[in-house]
């Protein structure tokens, strides 16, 4: 990978405070893989490429678990991410990201098929009743996606607010997440960063709403970022990101 001097300087400045959260844009000319699992709620994976330090594009796949009487849904989408604003200080950083995209979501429905009555010669010309059968039909629906993230961090404190929204003619789903964290020690460029976080999220869609509170442990070094923990209900949460 190659960097021009301006991009290299910007990347080094960002590197000094070791980004503490999964972000859709990490460095210019880099590919980023992100994956997320929330027990009983969702699984998501994304692959993106950043031609510049302020925008990236990529693809993703989201699987939503069924909630109560509502079925689960799957969405495969393309997305563009934009860095609207970044503030770099000597030992702190803040970012504002937005994104949007479109994809396809398979929709399955059961179709009834009634056969015509069959004449019965042994019953004085009357017809036997027709039969009713069902078959499964799958079609693809257009699904839209939009969201944004605001984050701020120092070497010891981290905060972020994120929202992500998916909608098609068959369903809608939104996740809002607030994270607060602290590091037990100040990390440097080549050291392992450790964070303890509290993550509060609300998952909503159609006629359901679910709140979750999770306690997470996060590790970050260079271009690799991993976090995991459990919610107060005992469900697993895990996220990973690495940049090439």
Image (tube, helix red, strand yellow):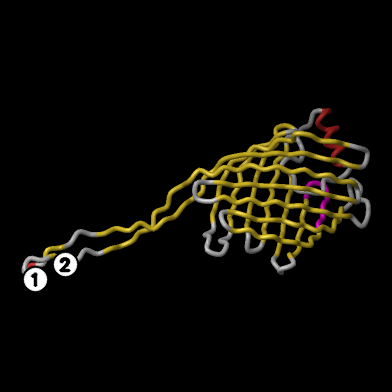
Residue 219 is a magenta residue = yes
* Measured Cα–Cα span from mark 2 to mark 1: 9 Å
Question: Which numbered dot is residue 123?
Answer: 1
Give neighbour class at mark 2: few <14, some 14-19, many 20+ (Cα, 10 Å).
few
Disc 2 secondary structure class: strand
Of residues 224 and 85, which is closer to you in this image? 85
Is 217 located above or below residue 99 in the figure?
below
From the image, give the main secondary structure of the stretch colored magenta. Answer: strand
Residue drawn at x 53%, y 51% as measured from the top left: 171
Query: In the image, residue 234 lies at what x, y percent?
Result: 71, 69
Q: Is residue 140 above or below residue 64?
A: above
Q: Position of residue 135 (x, y in %)?
A: 35, 59
Residue range of the region highlighted in magenta in the rendering: 218-224
* Element type where label 1 sits in the image: helix
Determine whether, in the image, residue 67 is placed left or right of residue 121: right
**Residue 158, image x, y percentages:** 85, 50
Q: Residue at x 75, y 57 (%)?
A: 200
Name the N-terminal-most of marks 2 and 1: 1
Instruction: Tell me what residue is drawn at x 85 percent, y 56 percent.
Output: 195
Q: Are marks 2 and 1 in contact (CB under 8 Å)?
A: yes
Q: Which residue is mark 2?
A: 128
Q: x and y percent of residue 128 in the render?
A: 16, 67
Quarter the N terminus occupies: top right
On-image quarter of the C terminus: top right
Q: Is residue 20 left or right of residue 122?
A: right
As for residue 203 lying within the magenta part, the answer is: no
Q: Which mark is residue 49?
A: none
- Residue reaching furthest to the front: 207
Residue farthest to the bottom? 122
**242 with respect to 77 (left or right):** right
Quadrant hosting residue 126: bottom left
């Amino acid at each position: 990978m190659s960097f021009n001097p301006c991009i290299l300087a910007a990347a080094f400045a960002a590197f000094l405070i070791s980004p503490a959260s999964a972000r859709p844009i990490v460095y210019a000319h880099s590919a980023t893989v992100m994956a997320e699992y929330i027990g009983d709620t969702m699984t998501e994976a994304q692959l993106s490429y950043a031609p510049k330090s302020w925008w990236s594009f990529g693809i993703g796949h989201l699987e939503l678990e069924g909630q109560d009487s509502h079925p689960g849904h799957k969405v495969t989408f393309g997305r563009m991410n934009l860095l609207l604003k970044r503030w770099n200080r000597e030992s702190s950083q803040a970012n504002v990201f937005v994104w949007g995209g479109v994809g396809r979501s398979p929709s399955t429905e059961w179709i009834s098929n009634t056969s015509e009555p069959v004449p019965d010669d042994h019953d004085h010309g009357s017809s036997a009743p027709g039969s009713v059968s069902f078959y499964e039909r799958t079609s693809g629906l257009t699904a839209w996606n939009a969201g944004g993230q605001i984050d701020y961090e120092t070497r010891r404190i981290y905060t972020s607010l994120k929202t992500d929204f998916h909608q098609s003619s068959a369903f809608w789903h939104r996740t809002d997440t607030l994270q607060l964290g602290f590091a037990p020690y100040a990390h440097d460029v080549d050291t392992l960063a450790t964070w303890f976080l509290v993550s509060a999220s609300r998952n909503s869609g159609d006629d359901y709403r679910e709140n979750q509170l999770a306690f997470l442990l996060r590790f970050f070094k260079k271009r690799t970022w991993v976090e995991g923990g459990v919610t107060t209900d005992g469900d697993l949460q895990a996220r990973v990101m690495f940049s090439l």
